[in-house]
Image (cartoon, rainbow, N blue to C red):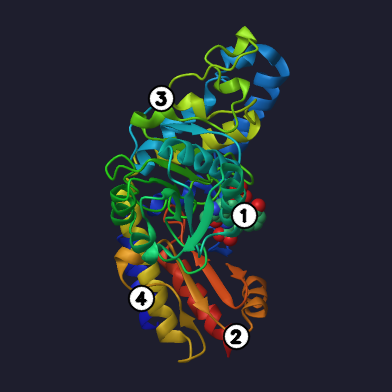
Amino acid sequence: MSEPILRAQKLDAADELAGLRAKFVLDEVVYLDGNSLGALPAAVPARMEDVVRRQWGSLRIRSWDESGWWTAPERIGDRIAPLVGAAPGQIVVGDSTSVNVFKALVAAVRLAGEGRDEIVVDATTFPTDGYIAESAARMTGCTLRPATPAEVPDVVTGRTAAVLLNHVDYRTGRLHDLPGLTAAVHEAGAVVVWDLCHSAGALPVGLDEHGVDLAVGCTYKYLNGGPGSPAFLYVRRELQDRFDSPLPGWNSHTEPFGMRPAYEPAAGAVRGRVGTPDILSMLALEAALEVWEGVPIDAVRAKSLALTDFFLECVAAYVPEGAVESLTPVAHAERGSQVALHCPGAGDVMKRLIENGVVGDFRPPDVLRFGFTPLYVGFADVERAARILAGTLS
Ligand SMILES: Cc1ncc(COP(=O)(O)O)c(C=O)c1O
Ligand SMILES: Nc1c(O)cccc1C(=O)C[C@H](N)C(=O)O
């Protein structure tokens, strides 16, 4: 047996999270696309059967109270909170990430106050954040200044109102320095908004510890909430009273069923809500989050780094030199939970990989992306993926 296969066996045998794989619906495919859409947790279908048939089918309107539908956005927010280092009462679940980026960024400019007329946006951002930042800047009368995360400490000034950053770069897998960049933004007196789509559920974030102001993230990647599952919005407790949402719907009113003509915002995380929550997706997410019971995020991070290290090792062992080049930083402090490989003809290579039972994804112009979800990816999967990649390239 080859050396990487033996190593994989040893690593799998010592993996304290290995048992979690059984909590997911998986097959013989090596699934390395959990950074796009997480796998289905096995408890979700039966829960949805109950939600649809009993809660909706039998209880109907009563379920808003009796099945806890009305309070689901805050309840599920509190379930996500420990995974991103937040105390309870600061996260609300609902709407898409894009919509929450809009809420957070406009609210950030309003929090920053008079005399600040610039929004700094991550120049390497996932496109939706950039599009929304451009619109938010136009709406608030701000100038938009794109900057790479590394440039942020040098570009923030007394004019900066808000800075929108990605925790992990969706293309390269680079992890940015959230504590350091948050401190740099604060030093300039500005408000920071973090997009945690590629870090929530993959690594410790430490929102409270690092004094983050506002954050958003999706739940369909490492949190396995399902296609289009609702996103989350974090508003630091000390800012909640001043959080002025640009989408003040009736669900965030202090007395929603008072049906009053004048808007009066509720206290707390509820202020981030807009309209009627998407209950089916939300309750699928709630069931999906049960797999996290007793799972420390530090153990997830340790396994994630071991998986990505081992993948890079196997690629180096199997793939002919020069055929691919890793875009993902080697330093653990700069790596998320994915590996991105630059590869000529990456689109076709990924098609062949998928035909051969290894699912990752392709991002233009020439990037092969492999996401490693520590809850269900094992070391034998990693070895097999690298071996099949080498076969695809030869
Ligand atoms: C960093 C980042 N932000 C935002 C999004 C998109 O959010 P939405 O759920 O609104 O499509 C994604 C992925 O789709 C993403 O990777
Ligand atoms: N949200 C997605 C979707 O609706 C379809 C396909 C992919 C996605 C993704 O999440 C892509 C992902 N954010 C990325 O990093 O590229």
Name the kind of residue labelled 2 in the image: Pro
Local packing at callout 3 (Cα closer than 10 Å; few below 14, some 14-19, many 20+) is some
Viewer-closest of 29 and 337 = 337
**Which amino acid is tagged 4?**
Leu
Q: Earlier in the sequence, mark 3 or mark 1?
A: 1
Query: Which numbered marker is on residue 241?
Result: 3
Which quadrant: the C terminus?
A: bottom right
Coordinates of residue 283 in the picture (x, y in percent): 58, 31
Query: Quick one: label 4 or label 1, which is nearer the N terminus?
Result: 4
Q: Earlier in the sequence, mark 4 or mark 2?
A: 4
Near mark 1 (Cα within 10 A), the count class, few <14, some 14-19 or many ≥20, is few
Look at mark 2 in the image and give the residue it sits on.
344
Tag 4 secondary structure: helix
Residue 36, given in percent of the width and then of the height, sits at 57, 57
Q: Which amino acid, by three-letter code, is at mark 1?
A: Tyr
Does residue 38 appear anywhere in the picture?
no
Question: Residue 8 lies in what quarter of the image?
Answer: bottom left
**Image quarter of residue 292:** top left
Q: Is mark 1 within 8 Å of ligand 1?
A: no
Q: Residue at x 31, y 39 (%)?
A: 208
Circle 1 residue:
131
Secondary structure beneath dot 1 equals helix
Judge whether residue 116 can be spotted in this image: yes
